[in-house]
Each structure stands twice: as structure tokens, then as C-alpha cells.
Image (tube, rainbow, N blue to C red):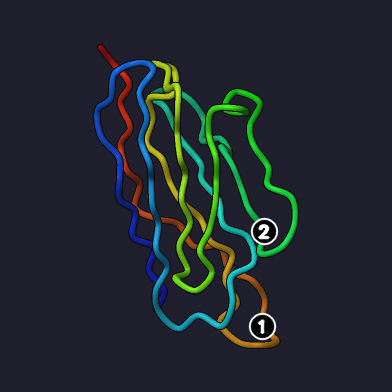
């Protein structure tokens, strides 16, 4: 059983900052890609940022230069530092992890439960 537990959401004023965390636990052999998605009311879920175990980080154009994704492999944790937040960043943020349960097994994508980020004055 694998779980992803998120924390760090909340209410912040425009221009403010928040840091999201997501820790994966359970019977994990390895984690390849970790990432963050978001879904605003009435909109489709979109990729915010992703980070492979080794390689180039990927960001949505709308967050480049403001958000930074990082991970701690020893803790199976991914972070999203969000600066210069705008009202349009308001959404439920979901973390993802592509996880191998065994050495030769396929990757399975797991999702966190979601955390609300609200940017408003």
C-alpha cells in the first residue's frame, strides 16, 4: 500500500509565498518522476511542474520563474516552492509519484489527496 500525503496549502495574499510538501510512504522500491498538478474550479487539471530522479525539471509556462520544484530522495518527498503568487494560481494542488513496487516492475502513478491553495486579498 502506497500513500502520498500533502501539506502546506492555505490562504495567502497576492505576491505571497507558500511551500507545498508531499511525502510518499509504503512498499516503494523506487520513484522515477514526482510532480505537481492543479485544478481550478471549472477548469481541467493541469501539470504545474515535474522532476525526474535524474534530469531536467519541467514547468508550466504560467509558473516559470515563480515556482520551484525539488525532491528529497532519502525522504521520498517532493516540494513545490511557490513565490509571487497570483489569484489565478488558486486551485487544488495534487502531487504525483511514478513508483516502482518491485525491481523489474512497471511504474504506477499515485496521487495525493489534494491541498487547497487560495490566493486572495
Question: Counting residues from the N terminus, which is met first, the one under dot 2 or under dot 1?
Answer: 2
The image shows residue 22, relative to residue 36, as above or below, that is: below
Element marked by disc 1: loop
Residue drawn 53% across the image and 58% down it: 71
Quadrant, the C terminus:
top left
Q: Which residue is farthest right?
A: 55
The residue wearing badge 1 is: 105
The residue wearing badge 2 is: 52
Front-most of residues 14 and 3: 14
Quadrant in the picture for residue 27: bottom left
Element marked by disc 2: loop
The image shows residue 55, relative to residue 74, as above or below, that is: above
Q: Which mark is residue 14?
A: none
Q: Relative to 44, is 32 on the left or the right?
A: right
Q: Relative to 31, is 111 on the left or the right?
A: left
Residue drawn 37% across the image and 30% down it: 17
Q: Residues within 10 Å of mark 2 (few under 14, many from 20)?
A: some
The image shows residue 66, relative to residue 74, as above or below, that is: above
Residue drawn 32% across the image and 43% down it: 115
Residue 22, image x, y percentages: 40, 56
Badges 2 and 1: C-beta atoms under 8 Å apart? no
Q: Nearer the viewer, mark 2 or mark 1?
A: 2
Residue 117, image x, y percentages: 33, 32
Amino acid at each position: 500500500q502506497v500513500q502520498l500525503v500533502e501539506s502546506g496549502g492555505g490562504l495567502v495574499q497576492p505576491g505571497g509565498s507558500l511551500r507545498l510538501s508531499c511525502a510518499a510512504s509504503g512498499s516503494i522500491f523506487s520513484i522515477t518522476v514526482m510532480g505537481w498538478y492543479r485544478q481550478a474550479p471549472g477548469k481541467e487539471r493541469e501539470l504545474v511542474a515535474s522532476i525526474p530522479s535524474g534530469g531536467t525539471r519541467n514547468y508550466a509556462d504560467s509558473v516559470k520563474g515563480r515556482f520551484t520544484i525539488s525532491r528529497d530522495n532519502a525522504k521520498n518527498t517532493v516540494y513545490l516552492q511557490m513565490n509571487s503568487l497570483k489569484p489565478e494560481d488558486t486551485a487544488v494542488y495534487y502531487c504525483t509519484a511514478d513508483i516502482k513496487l518491485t525491481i523489474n516492475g512497471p511504474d504506477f502513478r499515485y496521487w495525493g489527496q489534494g491541498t487547497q491553495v487560495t490566493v486572495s486579498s
